[in-house]
Image: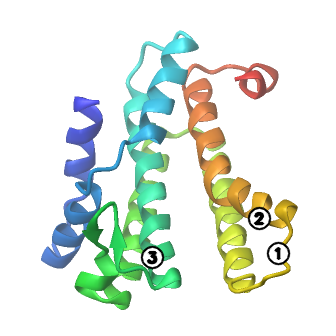
């Protein structure tokens, strides 16, 4: 994870100081980094010995962090993990824009990895996450929300990114479609 953290700090750098400050604040907020760990473990379990899985771990964390920044704005959250949210500290506009910066930095890194399946997988995952966010926003305060609808939101927002993390490790190891799905 040290290599992941170092690359994350390197890729967070911008010529705009506020991006550096806000990005560092949210990345260093005490998250468990479960998704990057999932990428690393899946790659190892699949016998991968290269280094692209480090980039993939950073990519998934940047995507996850961007979703958190956007989610906190939509939910009007003021606290996350016992700390002030970025939007409470810097405002909604800067939080959304730094979330967009993290997405675009993740896309740059996907190009560096040069594997179309990585781009396809994360494009699909971010679309599903966005749909889950919209579903959640539309159902806010809905007392008639069914358990199935609630579980669909969770699957869209949380489970999909974990599944993508596991599959990224398999993509790094160049497993075929059937093997990736088994993982």
Position above or below: 59 against 113: below
Total of numbered circles in the picture? 3
Query: In this figure, which residue is indicated by the disc labeled 3?
Result: 72
Query: As drawn, is 64 to the left or to the right of 31?
Result: right
User: Label 3 to label 1, Cα distance in Å?
Assistant: 21 Å
Report the residue at 69% width, 75% height from top: 136
Quarter of the image where one finds residue 21:
bottom left
Query: In this figure, which residue is indicated by the disc labeled 2?
Result: 150
**Residue 124 on image: x %, y %:** 70, 55
Position above or below: 3 against 136: above
For the residues carrying marks 3 and 1, which lies nearer the camera in this image?
Answer: 1
Considering every residue shown, the one lying at the far front of the view is 143
Contact, mark 3 vs mark 2 (Cβ under 8 Å): no
Within 10 Å of the Cα at label 2, are there few (<14), some (14-19), or many (20+) other Cα atoms?
some
- Which of pointers 3 and 2 lies earlier in the amino acid sequence? 3
The one of 181 and 92 positioned closer to us in this rendering? 92
Quarter of the image where one finds residue 49:
top left
**Residue 93 on image: x %, y %:** 37, 90
Quadrant position of the C terminus in the picture: top right
Quarter of the image where one finds residue 132:
bottom right
Report the residue at 37% width, 88% height from top: 92
Tell me the SS state at disc 2.
Answer: helix
- What mark, if any, has residue 145 been given in the picture? 1
């Amino acid at each position: 994870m040290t290599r992941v953290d170092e690359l994350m700090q390197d890729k967070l750098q911008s010529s705009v100081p506020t991006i550096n400050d806000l990005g560092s604040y949210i990345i260093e907020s005490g998250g468990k980094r479960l998704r990057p760990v999932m990428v690393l473990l899946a790659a190892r379990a699949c016998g991968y010995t290269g280094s692209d899985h480090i980039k993939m771990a950073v990519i998934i964390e940047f995507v996850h962090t961007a979703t958190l920044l956007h989610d906190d704005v939509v939910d009007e959250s003021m606290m996350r993990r016992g700390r002030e949210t970025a939007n409470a500290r810097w405002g909604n506009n800067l939080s959304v824009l730094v979330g967009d910066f993290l997405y675009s930095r993740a896309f740059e890194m996907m190009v560096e990895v040069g594997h179309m399946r990585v781009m396809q997988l994360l494009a699909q995952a971010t679309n599903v996450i966005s749909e889950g966010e919209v579903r959640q926003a539309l159902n806010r305060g809905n007392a008639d929300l069914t358990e199935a609808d609630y579980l669909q939101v969770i699957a869209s927002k949380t489970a999909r990114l974990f599944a993508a993390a596991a599959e990224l490790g398999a993509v790094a190891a160049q497993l075929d479609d059937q093997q990736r799905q088994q993982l």
